[in-house]
Image (cartoon, rainbow, N blue to C red):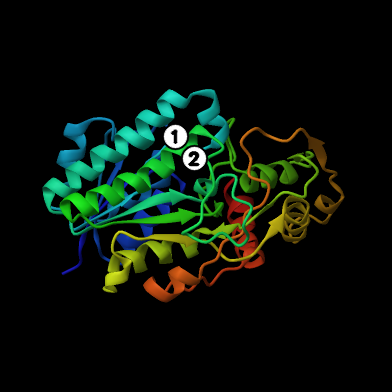
Amino acid sequence: MKNNLLITGAAGFIGSNLSEYFCKKGYDVLALDNLSTGHFKNIEHLASYPNFKFIEGDIRDVTTCDAAVKGRDFVMHQAALGSVPRSLKDPITSNEVNVGGFLNMLVASNNAGVKKMIYAASSSTYGDSQELPKKEGIIGKPLSPYAVTKFVNELYAGVFYKSYGFNAIGLRYFNVFGRKQSPEGAYAAVIPLFTKKLMNKESPIINGDGSFSRDFTYIDNVIQANERAMLSTNPKSANNIFNVACGEQTDLNSLVDLLKEALSRYDESIKDVEVIYGPTRDGDIPHSLASIQKAKEIIEYDPKYDIKKGLNLAVDWYWNNL
């Protein structure tokens, strides 16, 4: 008998990929999303699966959370308002969703006897820490309201473990990219945004001089991390925090070069599109590179997709779907 899963934020980028993966593996998947930033089209094709059910609802509503967790073995909590710039523009709503909604899910899951909750933490928690690579036990001060909310999630998870024995595992995602990540909207992530620009022969705009770097992480690595955290029987995994990344540092100038190379398989002239440089964004961390040693040792995380392999797959998807 496969386990029953609740996936919140299931119509979003990461949530929809998790929903599809576990549906196809035969898990009983209940998908929850308020469709404020997620898109139903991402999971519409799963409606034909007898082991998939979607409910439209908001994690800010306690009653919705209570109903969603009922009878669920595991919760994969992906629902959140992402984006550092969004949180700087509207910190109140980011807090309501990311902190209030997270607390609702913790309380509901604990009360319902959920075995384990895997939740989306964030590399933004490292804040102004200069240390590279980033190791889970050493963080700096947050640089944005979004970073504050994701750090508070970790604090609440720790309190619930100490107070109630509830097991919630945080996965600090590092710049996840891949199929179904939208290039639309004011807060689109850099890879889908640049990919669409280049496909349209428009100049991508880099914030800063292009030297800022990230540990870009392909979606299938993230799916694997969620599954291994959920199924881990290692007692050291309980109430722990893990970096989910590839362990590769790529600056934005190099990212554009890699995207041009991948896209030139379809259109050689894309290599000639020039880049525009703009001002640095508030709240941006200059450099991000993860140590994934802890995740490898405790939950046997073993990422299979490096930046180049992931970008080729992502570009294939965008070329055929945009």
Q: Looking at the picture, how far across and down is residue 92, in whole percent?
A: 42, 24
- Between 153 and 71, the residue placed more toward the observer is 153
Give the labeled residue for mark 1: 37
In the rendered structure, the answer to whether residue 123 lies left or right of residue 152 reads right
- Residue visible at 85% across and 44% down? 274
- Between 114 and 269, the residue placed more toward the observer is 114
Q: Looking at the picture, how far across and down is residue 8, in whole percent?
A: 32, 45
Picture quadrant where residue 283 is located: top right
Q: Quadrant of the N terminus?
A: bottom left
- Residue visible at 84% across and 52% down? 269
Q: Looking at the picture, how far across and down is residue 237, in whole percent?
A: 32, 67
In the rendered structure, the answer to whether residue 54 lies left or right of residue 258 reads left
In terms of secondary structure, where does tag 2 sit? helix
In terms of secondary structure, where does tag 1 sit? loop
What amino acid type is highlighted by mark number 2?
A: Ala
Picture quadrant where residue 67 is located: top left
